[in-house]
Image: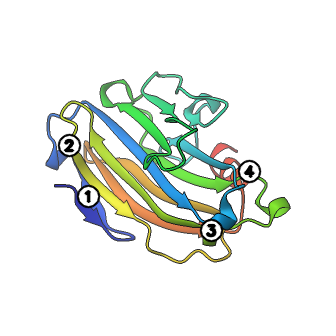
Amino acid sequence: MAVQLSKGERFNISEAAPDLKKMAIALGWQLTEAGQNYEIDVSAFMLGSDGKVPNEKYFIFYNNLVSCDNSVLQFIPDQNNPNKENKTIYGVILKRVNPEIEEMTFAVTIHEADRIKGDFSNIKNAFIKIVNLDTGSELVRYELKESFSRETAVEFGRLYRKNGDWRFQAVGAGYQAGLQSFVDKYCS
């Protein structure tokens, strides 16, 4: 059974699954009727020790689906099925992750939120979870319970290395910003 985290809590993945080689990091949500026209973007930023993306190919999003070290792949399941739980999945092969990468952060933004007057109040039941791809077992899940009434971007969680172990932190930080603000923060 998966460990349920609350905002800010951390989980040692390497300790819970010492033989873990491949994982899926799935993000999902439901849109209210008012949010049906939203185009949602999910992005992963693979960061070095300075908190920055060392190469633009470590920014995984709709225009770059695979990291340059071939360790992370973004996959979007059947877009024609709006009831599907997992909206975006990142496959991660841990042994391929460049040793220079110390953290991966996962953010969700509403495309052109200002123009369409969109915000996360029309997005509910949001979550991020990590699944062991070899066994199919869900290791950890964070369901975002926070009320994001004006936010147009949310950092769901982060995967990071500490003392040789892979760990996960439930972040749940909302911003009144778009994808470009994350690009400016992590890629400049």
Question: Which mark is in front, 4 or 2?
Answer: 2
For the residues marked 3 and 1, what is the alpha-carbon distance in whole angstroms? Answer: 29 Å
Question: Which mark is in front, 1 or 2?
Answer: 2
Residue at image location 58% in from the left, 54% down from the top? 108
Residue at image location 43% in from the left, 50% down from the top? 85
Is 178 drawn above or below residue 74 in the view shown?
A: below
Q: Which residue is mark 4?
A: 180
Q: Amino acid at mark 3?
A: Asn
For the residues marked 4 and 3, what is the alpha-carbon distance in whole angstroms? Answer: 21 Å
Is 153 drawn above or below residue 79 in the view shown?
A: below
Q: Which residue is mark 3?
A: 122
| SS class, disc 1 | strand
Asked whether, in this view, residue 104 is left or right of residue 92, the answer is right
For the residues marked 1 and 4, what is the alpha-carbon distance in whole angstroms? Answer: 29 Å
Q: Residues within 10 Å of mark 2 (few under 14, many from 20)?
A: few
Front in this rendered view, residue 13 or 33: 33
- Disc on res. 11: 1
Mark earlier in primary sequence (4, 2): 2
Q: Residues within 10 Å of mark 3 (few under 14, many from 20)?
A: some
Quarter of the figure with the N terminus = bottom left
Mark earlier in primary sequence (4, 3): 3
How far across and down, in percent of the image, does residue 121 sit? 62, 72
Residue at image location 20% in from the left, 35% down from the top? 20
Mark earlier in primary sequence (2, 3): 3
- Disc on res. 137: 2
How far across and down, in percent of the image, does residue 91 sit? 40, 32
